[in-house]
Amino acid sequence: MLLTSILLSALFAGIVATLVTIAIEKFGGRTGGVLATIPTTIVPAALGMYSISGEAEFAQSMSIVPLGMMVNAIFLLVWIHAPHRFGLSLVGTTILSLIVWTLIGSLGLLVSSELQASGVDALTYAVSGLGLLILLGVWTTWTSRPAPKGSRSVRPSVLILRGSAAATAIGIAVWFSSLSYPFVSGLVSTFPAIFLTSMIALWLAQGQDVPQGAAGPMMLGGASVGVYAVVAIVLFPMLGPVLGSIITWLISIIAWTIPAYIYLQWRQSLTSLDQRSEAGTSTMSS
């Protein structure tokens, strides 16, 4: 049962991960970035964790997911700013982003353990983390960045690598859950395998503009995973893992992904209007 849960969760996560880069290529960084962050790998991870752990441990695992997604948002901030501010190459940006994720994620684990050990319940902690994640996503995307479509295809070998990385991360997360390490499994389930491989694959295939344009929308869209985790804490015990997973997924899409996309389009329209106004003013003055 344990091995089956791990393998099925990992397989599904790997398949989903290979589709993300394609979405960004086809639809551009803004639309593709939001589509790429709908709850996907968290679904098999949550099903696997719920099937092999108790409700209390499942709630603990899910409670750290919003924090994990906030760490991922900071991870993406490195990709947005480090290449220009520090003149980093692809390799340098990759290493720095992983160091930042590891340090902040480890600190988050310690804080989570201490807070919940002191009596803070899992749902309250999860909602608090989700609120911080949403604030960071809105702040980052308030000023719209260029988010072009890719002009070249990502190689199949890179897609396979992306799928394998995501599958490995989710498989390890479910395994940790079986060992009664709920906080660790929750954080590992949010390891930025999709984000990391998306950034690398798109940089190699399209140059750094496409991944940087997608990073902001991915940060905002990633809050849908936090919404999924919060709702799952409530609905999985009530409805069971299968029906609960379906309803939870629909709620996260309706309550967050669609509004996030509308918000990004609104910010882009205002930015375009400001740019046209500035261009008109410059023309008149010249």
Image (cartoon, rainbow, N blue to C red):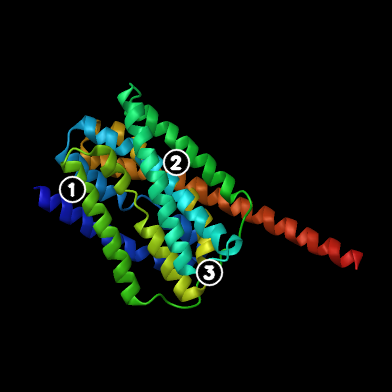
The residue that disc 3 covers is 208
| Amino acid type at image mark 3 | Gln
Q: Residue at x 23, y 30 (%)?
A: 56
Residue 159: mark: none
Question: Where residue 188 appears, x then y in whole percent?
Answer: 30, 48
Element under disc 3: loop
Question: How many numbered markers are drawn?
Answer: 3
Question: Where residue 136 appears, x then y in whole percent?
Answer: 53, 43
Residue 175: mark: 1
Element under disc 1: helix
Q: Which one is in front, 34 or 125?
A: 125
Q: Is residue 118 shown above or below 219?
A: above
Which picture quadrant has residue 98? bottom left
Element under disc 2: helix
Question: For the residues carrying marks 2 and 1, which lies nearer the camera in this image?
Answer: 1
Q: Which one is in front, 189 or 138?
A: 189
Residue 255: mark: 2
Residue 173 seen in the figure:
yes
Q: Which one is in front, 197 or 231?
A: 197
| Amino acid type at image mark 2 | Ala
Q: CA distance from mark 2 to mark 3?
A: 31 Å
Residue closest to the far right: 285
Question: For the residues carrying marks 2 and 3, which lies nearer the camera in this image?
Answer: 3
Q: CB of mark 2 within 8 Å of CB of mark 1? A: no
Question: Where residue 219 appears, x then y in whole percent?
Answer: 48, 51
Q: Residues within 10 Å of mark 1 (few under 14, many from 20)?
A: many
Q: Earlier in the sequence, mark 2 or mark 1?
A: 1
Which picture quadrant has residue 123? top left
Q: Residues within 10 Å of mark 2 (few under 14, many from 20)?
A: some
Q: Residues within 10 Å of mark 3 (few under 14, many from 20)?
A: some
Q: CA distance from mark 1 to mark 3?
A: 35 Å
Position of the C terminus by quadrant:
bottom right
